[in-house]
Structure formats: C-alpha cells, structure tokens
Image (cartoon, rainbow, N blue to C red):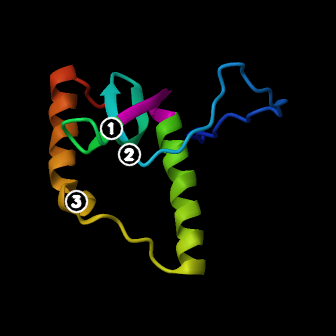
Amino acid sequence: MAESATPPVVPQAVAARSPLFRAFFSDFMRNRIGPGTFTVIFGAVVDDPGAPFANILQEEAQVTMSWAQLKTITTFFSEIVEIIESETGQIALPAQITEETQTRKESVRRNFRFLRINKP
C-alpha cells in the first residue's frame, strides 16, 4: 500500500517583531530566481523633479524565500484577490503587465536553464 504524502503540521507560534521590521508603500517589484530560492525586491516609484528622469525606482527591501514558501504565499494571495474581486469587481492591471507576460515567462525559463535547475 502506498503511503500518502501528508504535509507537516506547523506548530502554533508566538509572533514577535524584529528590530529590523519596517513598513513602507510599494508600487513596483522585481524578482530573482535561484536554485531553490525566490527573491522579490519591493520598491516605490518616487518623483525627483531635479533628476534627469522624472521617476526613480527606489528599492526599499527584499525578501528571499524557498520555492515552497513562494507557492504558499502565491496560493494565499490568489485566494485574497479572488475574494476582493468577488466583492468589488475585477482589479485592473496596467496594460504593460499583461502585455509582458510572455516575455517574463521566457526570461524565467532562460534563468532556469542557465542555472541548470531540473525537475527532481
């Protein structure tokens, strides 16, 4: 008889805030994928009238997580977006996001091939 794969039970924990904790607004992000890790860098578009470019992408923080955590957080976020949209209507994405979907997917595939990340 085959054993069923059951996910590990996460014990209850007490929440504590790190002295490095900070809150900020983010309206852009970029990411990096590594062998078993995913890093997302959050930032904000800031206006600097004296700069040669009107908008500056100011990076604020980065979070690196395992692929399992990436999948978990993606599931949670998808559920939250689904609930918000069921209550308020579809959230519109900037055209650039939807137009660049294929380009982003190809970039991720190239990175995986470069890192020689294969299926287990």
Disc marking residue 57: 1
Point out the tag, 3 or 2, that comes first from the N-terminus: 2
**Label 2 vs label 1, nearer the camera:** 1
Picture residue at 22% right of the left edge, 38% below the top: 108
65 drawn magenta: yes
Circle 3 residues within 10 Å: few <14, some 14–19, many ≥20: few
Task: Give x and y (percent) for residue 65.
Answer: 49, 28
Circle 2 residues within 10 Å: few <14, some 14–19, many ≥20: few
**Label 3 vs label 1, nearer the camera:** 1
Picture residue at 18% right of the left edge, 61% below the top: 99
Q: Quadrant of residue 79?
A: bottom right
Q: CA distance from mark 3 to mark 2?
A: 12 Å
> Label 3: which residue?
96
- CB-based contact (under 8 Å), mark 2 and mark 1: yes
Point out the tag, 2 or 1, that comes first from the N-terminus: 2
The disc labelled 1 sits on which kind of residue?
A: Leu
The disc labelled 2 sits on which kind of residue?
A: Phe
Give the magenta-colored segment's residue range: 58-68
